[in-house]
Image (cartoon, coloured by chain):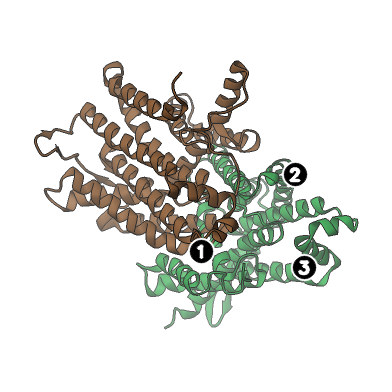
Amino acid sequence: MSDFPVFFLHGLAYGGLLFLVSAGLTLVFGMMNVLNFAHAAMYMLGAYFSYTILRMTGQFWLSLMICPLLLFVIGAVIERFLLRRVHVFGHVHELLLTFGLAYIITEVVKWVWGNFPLAVNVGGFLGGTVEIFGITYPLYRIFIFASAALVGIMMALILYRTRLGIILRAAVNDSEMVNALGFNVPLVFMGVFAFGAALSGFAGVIAGPLLSTYPGMANEILIDAFVVIVVGGFGSLGGAVVASLIIGELQSFGVLLFPKLSLALVYLLMSVVLIIKPSGLFGEKQ
Amino acid sequence: MIAKKNRPYLFIAFLFALGAVMPVLLRQYHLNMLTEIIVFALYAVSYNLLLGYAGLLSFGHAMFFGMGAFTVAVSLIHIPGLSLWGAIGLAIAMTTVVGFVTGGLLLRHKGAYFALLTLAFNSLFCAVATKWHTVTGGDDGLSVTRPDLSLGFTTINMAGLTSFYYFTLVIIGAAIVFCWYFTQTAMGQTVLMMRENEERMKFLGYNTNISRLILFTFTGAVAGLAGAFYTLHFQFCSQSAISVDMTTTVLLMTFVGGTGTFWGPMMGALVYVVLQNYLSDITDRWPLFMGLIFVFMVLFIPGGLTQIIQYVRNLFSGRNGTDKSLAVKEGSS
């Protein structure tokens, strides 16, 4: 099958993007126990910001730096002024709040940028192609996979090899004790949420040229990211890596092998995992 | 004074009487709107049984609503000579089965996991409805005509709005009363107590998993009935009936009305449909306003409109006791 390598690479690229989205989601979920329904909406916001910056300056690298920063600020504000307020009411209210925020962000996006797809062009060096496995392949898709790998490695290093990572993991287990030891735990949680938002913005910038930028993009990736979290295990970074790659490849080869069923394959995988191992491939028992 | 115990019955009788005289008072346009409100009221009530009574936040309620809507549309088109009762019965049967099967899978998880999974399943159903073009009509949707209603001794023509309105009022009204009755039964009380303290209920020998599955299936079937009437009312059914947006709609209605009482969500449905009709005349951005109202309420008025009404009522009467027969204690799981 001559198409095999191409579809394999397509799968890697989409899997990389999925990882970028679900990594932030699973990080916030694992650390703060908040399932952020607005995560994909913030990803979409990142993509639209990037579209505007690209229209104005044409600098892809610039937007790749600015958009995550913008989203970082937005994430920090949401955590500090909204999420922290409803935290005392419990889980249901946190979910309702992030759900409401996702709804509002989607409406604002439709209002400001319009309810139609916008094409984004990377241009420059990244817009080119490379020879790989004897086929000509767009460089941009390889760039997606590379940046996802980079982000994944950096997150793992920070979490498991630095002092900050130790504080983070300790705050999850016993936030009161960490607070008593003199660390500002609310600030840490704000940082985690804002970092998750920044990650979603980064993913949004990257997604823009690959998929088109349109108001339905949030819901589309949200479901796939949820499936990644369910399959990989709730709050597990390693699980997110494996599950994103599986689902990326599944989507890609699904289109090639069973065009009619490609969509159902992902859900099928999720259902099978749910039946056999409800906590996910790498999840701990609840 | 009327005994407190009888108040809900009087309230129900009053609502039915009010509903019965409405066709005389309202014009076509408003009667149309009222029919929609009644259908959505049942949908919101069924959702509140999950959210308010059991503390289960589901983002997949539209899969039952849409399933009911599509079952009616598809069966009316493909089974010639099917009666109205048959179509509605099929819709309820379908959603009961779907509720039981999906509930078995989804209820293994709680809290955020449950919310996430229900949303994923809702998208699955929506995707199937969109892609399975030969049966569901895909993006084009399905058009149906309401068959005549056979009552055994006579047949009523359902083409007119007024006759359909009365039919909706009776059937949906009865379903809502049945839901209310359900909350008063031992089963309904079990669900309520499970939300408050599940460990203790397990100690007392209740199988909480089965109770939850029964509740989930029941609410699914009720939502399916509402969906069936949605199709019959608009004589049209499209992918939007099963989309995640339809879940958002019911969530907004229920929360804005107030999850703390049985009747709150019905008020939420009224407010939502009325606001939607009038705001959409003024501005195209009305979903944004609904979203802002929703987030504002989550932040500051978690009890919804019911909380405001209760507050105002207490201001005027000077008492701080609430009507216990209607009120369910506000709380989060």
Subunit of label 2: A
- At 65% from the left edge and 34% from the top edge, which residue is drawn? B300
- Which label sits on residue A40? none
Rendered view: A137 above or below B128: below
Q: Are marks 3 and 1 in contact (CB under 8 Å)?
A: no
Q: Secondary structure at mark 3?
A: helix
For residue A159, which numbered disc appears in the image? 3
Q: Residue at x 74, y 56 (%)?
A: A192
Q: Nearer the viewer, residue A25 or B201?
A: B201
Seen in the picture, residue A56 relative to B208 is either above or below; the reply is: above
Q: Give me the chain that's brown.
A: B
Q: Which residue is mark 1?
A: B108
Residues marked 3 and 1, same chain? no
How far across and down, in percent of the image, does residue B178 sit? 35, 40
**C-alpha gap between disc 3 and disc 1:** 30 Å
Circles 2 and 1, Cβ within 8 Å, touching? The answer is: no
> Can you give x and y, in whole percent of width and height, for residue B30 in the image?
33, 23
CB within 8 Å, label 3 to label 2: no
Question: Chain A rendered in what hue?
Answer: green
